[in-house]
Image: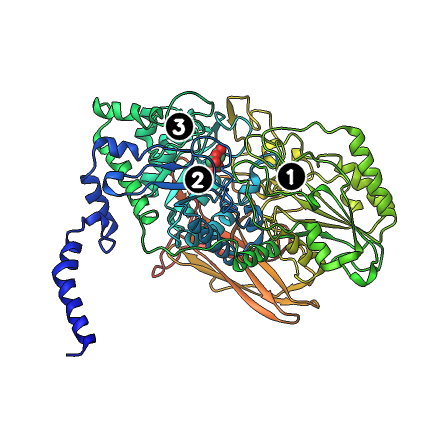
Amino acid sequence: MKLKLKIKIIWVCLSVLVVRPVYAQLPVYLDEDKPVEERVKDALSRMTLEEKVALCHAQSKFSSAGVPRLGIPELWMSDGPHGVRAELNWNNWHYAEWTNDSITAFPALTCLAATWNPEMAAKYGKALGEEARYREKDVILGPGVNIYRTPLNGRNFEYMGEDPYLAGTLCVPYIQEVQKNGVAVSVKHYALNNQELWRDYIDVYLSERVLHEIYLPAFKMAVQQGGAWTVMGAYNKFRGQHACHNETLLRKILKEDWKFDGVVVSDWGGVHDTYEAALNGMDIEMGSYTNGLTSESAFTYNDYYLAHPYLKMLKEGKIAEENINDKASRILRLIFRTAMNRRKPYGAIANEEHYQSAREIGNEGIVLLKNAPVAKKSAPLLPIDASKYKRILVVGDNAVRPLNQGGGSSELKVKDMVSPLDGLRAVYGDKIRYTQGYVAGKPMYGNVEEIPQTVTDSLRAEAVAMAKESDLVILVGGLNKNHQQDSEAGDRISYGLPFGQDELIEELQTVNRNLILVLLSGNAVEMPWINKVPAIVQGWYLGSMGGHSLADVLSGAVNPSGKLPFSFPARLADCGAHAFDELCYPGDGEKEEYKEDIFVGYRWHDTKKIPALFPFGHGLSYTTFAYGKPSADKKIMKADEQISFSVSVKNTGMCEGQEVVQLYISDKKSSLPRPVKELKGFKKIKLAPGEEKTVTLTIDKGALSYFDDKRHEWVAEPGKFEALIGSSSTDIKAVVPFDFSMCNKNEDSILSEKRPK
Ligand code: BGC
């Protein structure tokens, strides 16, 4: 017999006699071929009460325990949501100073929302998931989908704008792609964490209707369509109870109504009561300090609310054992999906593909707000025609500032970072000169640095002098990631631009009319000089490749296609949250009432007829698009049917471009007040010059429905509706009327149906 054959026979015998029996003895929970639920049940049956409780709270700043005796690994978490945060020490908030944890910073979520492109959200999730996997994280703490209620919220940059449909649609592919890497997302901050001021205790009151129509849908889509494996409870209170142990939010809506099978993780220090947290659906308590609260103490992780105090209540029979069994099952399920998933890919970090994704997302998210000619008959300033300018002056702290630093938990340690100045130099070389123009203090979180006026004055004077001698000025300003800017744990204190930028803009434009303003921020700002500045670009926080993305758009290598995910009110008082008293925003220090109700963002501007400075959905292009006459596939939509609207769009300009076709639905008559219109569909299309495409957007009755407080359900009333198709929430190109009938497909519709009183 040949040697090869002999070896084969020996191998087969060995595997039959030795390997297979050993394998057969594998406990069910270790067998990845077994259904997850069987494995959960098996693991649970082998665990002591103490082991189950140990799963339910932190064991370090960013990890929770597994079951060492059974070989079940711990869970490692990391912020989130724009990249994987640098390693922190086991037991305090200092960075661990590792040298292998530098990553790609992706554009902030406001920028992702501004792409209006689910494909970009998928790219984002894939790359971020791969980086998290490579860094051996099991849970990445993001995405954030809290609704943009006021431009003063310090954390808007981590969220996806003012519209629940837009935020929900974009978070779904992000979540799905991250989780393909065996890394869970943690959708945050559930719910109503819409400001940072007094975030630990502000008690939010709002109608049942606005809760369901505006503040919850993105979370619901994240859970039901995205399949999110974890959700993070928020710091604030809702109707007198902390969100992290809120009976309505967690137990009733998330777990019972939405059938969430994952884990609720607390925000760090967000749990304040053992019994409530245990009963109302909190699963893993994480903490800011060792006692779990947001102030330091000598306590240990065992003193967390869901540690020994919880164990004691279980032992005393004050809390039933099924309560811990439910939590432990959820956590085991999460561990099997992530830490103990041997089939997950390996991941990758800061590679070319990730940089490319970051750059593309930036390219697609940058919004061209304004692009007017400087003089009659002259061309707009953008894209920059380099042949016209010998000396280009770049001004502004944000042109060089490391905007990955500060902001709070979303701070990132980057491997590479291309600043706007670097990006512009790479295109325009020696033509570029730079001056800071204003001073904004060093990047820091949690403090405001005093800036002497003399420094501000001299920097401004220098910039103005240099601008006089330049052919073109690009001011890269906006907000930054310091306290009271775009940063955690505090709100902005004014709507205007900080650090004397208003004065700087005024003075620059008097000496040089060729002024391009690039705003880097996660929030709208007041623009008192709007009529004097010909070109304005909203550039968000763009991450590692931000400088290239900006230069791509300013130079015209890329045609801008971003659209605003939130309105820019002209004045703060034009925003619904600021149209009432202090109780409406920021609250009285204890309580807050959302008096603008369902009229958030463009819903407010439309209904109150207060035009926004730049409306939701707005964004210009270097080309032009012509919309054809739209059509619907039916005149009457029945209750169990869908309706489709089609419209042709033609690129009538000289360069390739992308357009976002937006579909808003308007209910012509309803029993309850409704916004003038609401976004219910959109599609981004790419068109070469002269090219024409037809876009079809389909909705069902869900898109016609409102939440009826009294009946506690979604209601679509029969009657007349309109589909508004446009290029922004105010640039509506065409209106298609249609009827909605309560009959089903095979029944005759009765058009005289009356709306319920
Ligand atoms: C933030 C969370 C973050 C957590 C961990 C909290 O202060 O609100 O968003 O994930 O810290 O860093």
Give the farthest residue toward the bottom. Answer: 1
For residue 480, the mark is 1
Q: Residues within 10 Å of mark 2 (few under 14, many from 20)?
A: many
Identify the residue at horizontal 29%, vertical 32% (top origin).
54
Q: Residue at x 76, y 28 (%)?
A: 452
Above or below, 5 against 41 in this view is: below
**In the displayed structure, does residue 658 sit left or right of residue 424?**
left
Q: Nearer the viewer, mark 3 or mark 2?
A: 3
Q: State how far apart marks 3 and 2 are (Cα).
A: 24 Å
Residue 233 position, x and y percent, is: 42, 35
- The local secondary structure at tag 3 comes to loop
Q: Quadrant of the N terminus?
A: bottom left
Mark 3 or mark 2: whose residue is earlier in sequence: 2
**Residue type highlighted by circle 3:** Val
Q: Is 176 situated left or right of 323 in this image?
A: right
Residue 68 can be seen, yes or no: yes
Q: Which mark is residue 212?
A: 2
Instruction: Residue 271: give its label.
Output: 3
Coordinates of residue 43 in the picture (x, y in percent): 21, 43
